[in-house]
Image: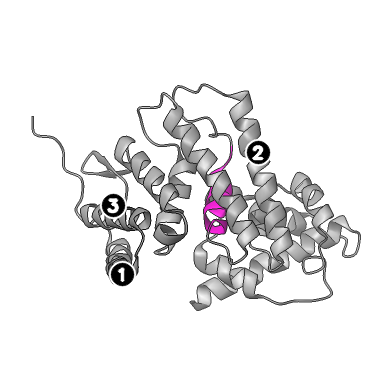
Amino acid sequence: MGAGAKSEAIRLTAAAIEILGARADENPAGDDAVHNETVARVDRLLEHGISRRVDHRVRQRQLANNPWADLAVAAAEDAVAATPGMLVLLGSHPNGYIRQEAVRLATAALVEAAKTDPAPTDSGASSKVLPGVTRMLAQRALDSSPQVRSAASEAVRLLFVNELASDNTGRMPTNVERAGRELLAHVRCVVEWPGLVETALDLFDNRVGRYSNNGVRDHHRHNLREVDRRSQLLADLRKLRPTIEESVPQHAADRLIDFYERSMHPTQAAAS
């Protein structure tokens, strides 16, 4: 875990303490401009989410006697209603019950989106749920708490199934793609949720990627950092594969290995 992740975790935790403290009148905002910027910083998490490294750092920060550490599960929904970005941040809370509540709230948003837009034609039934939230759900699908893990995996399944059932033939919605990329970035996803892995791979095989390479849409950036990340992931998958004994996760692992092997080469334009 790099120093950058640690520093960002400290900043986000401090922001949560300020926002929750101001709501509880324990720490009223003395400077409205500063307070508003803090809220805006947290709300920006809705678009981008939190990286795995920062998520780990936030969950590992054991604090006490402040509004963040002492937040009650019953107060989480009001906190999210007041500052929507808190939904993403609460998904990284050290308290598993708070993380579970964040997953519940995010799942409710997915269900509501599907109800209000049940038959989309271009962007998926859950496109109204922002990418930072779906990224959080994918991270929580591999949470250390079985209850959080199970609830989050069901939410991610709903997201993927809704998109597969849509009439979308264009680019995968950003929120679906972000969840898929996040899930497939964890080697143990093939053991924990092989069915989800297969569904995510079906989506990547049947939707247009978000990145462009010489005018051709691709699913990954092709820079040195990304290639290095995928190379390490491939090495870890190949090491894990011989230890898997059940056929379903074996098949998921084989497909994921193939996906990353193919992804190492930029997509080529079809010959005219």
**Within-10-Å neighbours for mark 3: few <14, some 14–19, many 20+:** some
Q: Height in image: 70 above or below 155?
A: below
Q: Is residue 167 left or right of residue 258?
A: right
> Which numbered disc, 3 or 1, marks the residue that appears first in the sequence?
1
**Residue that label 2 marks:** 109
Q: Amino acid at mark 2?
A: Ala
Residue contact at pointers 2 and 1, CB within 8 angstroms: no
Badge number at residue 60:
none
**Residue that label 3 marks:** 255
131 or 214, nearer to the observer: 131
Q: Which residue is found at the position 52% from the left and 53% from the top? A: 138
Q: Which residue is found at the position 77% from the left and 44% from the top? A: 81
**Within-10-Å neighbours for mark 1: few <14, some 14–19, many 20+:** few
Q: Which residue is found at the position 91% from the left and 59% from the top? A: 25
Q: Amino acid at mark 1?
A: Gln
Residue situated furthest front in the rendering: 246
Q: Which residues are magenta?
A: 129-141
> Which numbered disc, 2 or 1, marks the residue that appears first in the sequence?
2
> Which numbered disc, 2 or 3, marks the residue that appears first in the sequence?
2
Residue 111 position, x and y percent, is: 63, 34
Q: Height in image: 129 above or below 233?
A: above
**Residue that label 1 marks:** 232
Residue 198 position, x and y percent, is: 37, 47
Label total for image: 3
